[in-house]
Amino acid sequence: FGPSQFAGFVADFCDWYPILGINIKLAVPRYRAREQHPDGNGWGRWILPYRLPAFAGMPDAVEQALTDDDSFEVLE
């Protein structure tokens, strides 16, 4: 499958059922690990997996979780 073929298959032939919540973690350089960021905001740029437009995935979950963080920027 290519990305669009996979997305079409999932949209047309699959149902979604939540099985667990995933606690999103951020890997930061050791020299920044002791910084304090209330509510996880203020870390800046994130590198996220490629987005599949046909359904929500990791990029959508992270963007939703950090919607109030003005420093948040995404690289795919």
Image: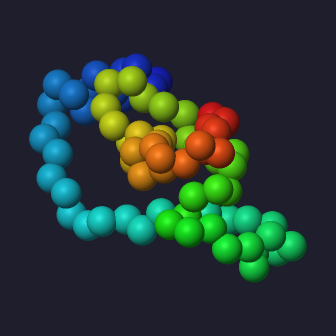
Percent position of residue 70, x then y: 59, 43
Q: Does residue 27 appear left or right of residue 55 in this picture?
A: right
Q: Position of residue 15 (x, y in %)?
A: 13, 41
Q: Residue at x 36, y 28 (%)?
A: 6
Q: Residue at x 34, y 37 (%)?
A: 56
Vertical comparison of 75 with 27: above or below: above
Residue 25 shows in the view: no
> Measuring 26% from the left and 67% from the top, which residue is drawn there?
20
- Determine whether, in the image, residue 70 is placed left or right of residue 29: left
Occupied quadrant, residue 55: top left
Residue 63's place in the image compared with 55, above or below, is below
The image quadrant of residue 75 is top right
How are the colours assigned in the image?
rainbow
54 or 64: nearer the viewer: 64
The residue that appears at 16% across and 37% down in the rendered structure is 14
| Left or right: 53, with 36 as reference point | left
Can residue 75 be seen here? yes
Residue 72 in picture, x, y percent from top left: 61, 44
Quarter holding the N terminus is top left
Q: What is the quadrant of the C terminus in the image?
A: top right
